[in-house]
Amino acid sequence: MRSPSLIHRALSFTLPLALLAAAPVAVTLSASPCYAQSDDADDVEKQAVQLFAEGKRLYGEGKLKQAVAKLEKAYDLRPAPPILLNIGKAYEKLGQKKKALLTYIKFLRKARLVSPFRPMISAKVKALKKETGYKGGDDGSLATYDTARTGGGSGSGGGRRRRGQMIHTPVDSVKVRQPLELQAELPPDAKADSVRVYFRRQGQTKFRSIAMDLQGDAYVARVPGKYVRTTSMQYYIEARNKGQKRPVAVAGTRRTPHIVVIDGGKPPSALPKSTDTIRSPYWTWFWVGVGVTAASLGAFGAFTALMLDRKAAIEDVAYSGGNDNRESFGVRARDWESQGKTFDAASKVFLAVGIAAAAGTGFLFYLDRKWVKRERARREADMASAPREKRRDVVRLFASPWATQSGAGFVGRIDF
């Protein structure tokens, strides 16, 4: 008899990181943490994983019958419903449509109601029932998850067709600073020019995005470990065509993203947004530059005023009619003219110094902002990874968006 923890793990439908890279389809065994598992359960799990890996390899080599046998044995040991999708797809490629149909129906009966595979499999079941003429009873599908269903009521032509659901098993946990590996497939007969995964850390409001690469039938992506730092993160996937506003297919949405718990991560810290407490090596020199600029431009203004004063004095005496002492006037005029030239030269020098100081001060301001930004990012990373007792003894207010399949909201916390 399997332990309850093993059954719980089999029903969690989480993609193990070790199997994501080479899986022929976007379905695999669960790798949820188990806290009280016996040695026998460990042996069963290892055997199931080994059988699944063999089945996956045979599937990739085109040996579909042998692959089905291995996958069915893996399912017997670990009855995780997503494995049935591998088996059903293999039956489809073998041309055994009725067996594929029965396998998909079995999946619908055993899978979670919120399984992301349900819309696509419901559509497959309908198509295969028409092709095979199957007249069985309940097929396990739910009308509310039918991708072909439209809204708007009768007589109005219906509403907009729902967006397709990508074949994707949500990842619900990952180790801190380890890459988050994701894999997804497009719905049947769907085509897309690009597929992107959007993600954000706990405490962030904006999503980053990276492109997913096509490998075989599946799109894969690795979210770098540097983004896997806090206690949780969120992501969703969109497939789009150029020129279309609505995505072709999705796995999660911006309003209801998938939530990933980060094992070993630290909650984000509320760092000061102002730069008052962060001083760069350029800060003092910046203010020195401001002072030199102000002094130089002030000196330029003073010497310019003196030069103009000497010029005005010469003109005033020359046109005042005071010609009684021409010799004395000539001596003073030559002195004022000499002084005026000196003051003019000095004003030009201080103007040049002021312009150069202003340019240097602007460059120092740029270096200061750049240094502060880099230092703030470093402090944020250090605070996120530091033990609680080593953090600054301040009050921190933290709020983070939260969402599930059934609702959304915000979670808040105050640290003292």
Image (cartoon, helix red, strand yellow):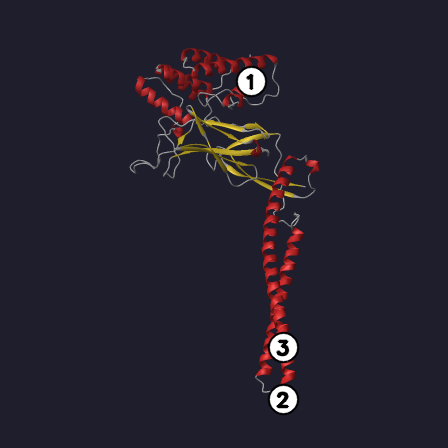
Q: Earlier in the sequence, mark 3 or mark 2?
A: 2
Say which of marks 1 and 2 sits in front.
Answer: 2
Q: Which residue is mark 1?
A: 6
Q: Quadrant of the N terminus?
A: top right
Percent x, y of residue 262: 58, 30
The tag on residue 324 is: 2
Q: Quadrant of the C terminus?
A: top right
Q: Residue at x 42, y 18 (%)?
A: 106
The residues bearing labels 1 and 2 have C-alpha atoms spaced at a distance of: 120 Å
Element carrying mark 2: loop
Q: Secondary structure at mark 1?
A: helix
Q: Tag 3: residue type? A: Arg
Query: Crowding at label 3, few (<14), some or many (≥20) Cα neighbours within 10 Å?
Result: few
Give left or right: position of 252 versus 345: left
Residue named by callout 3? 334
- Residue 214 picture quarter: top left
49 with respect to 140 (left or right)? right
- In this rendering, the answer to whether 221 lies above or below 279 is above
Occupied quadrant, residue 161: top left
Q: Is residue 185 visible?
A: yes
Query: Residues at badges 3 and 2 in contact (C-beta under 8 Å)?
Result: no
Between disc 1 and disc 2, whose residue precedes? 1
Percent of width and height locating residue 68:
43, 13
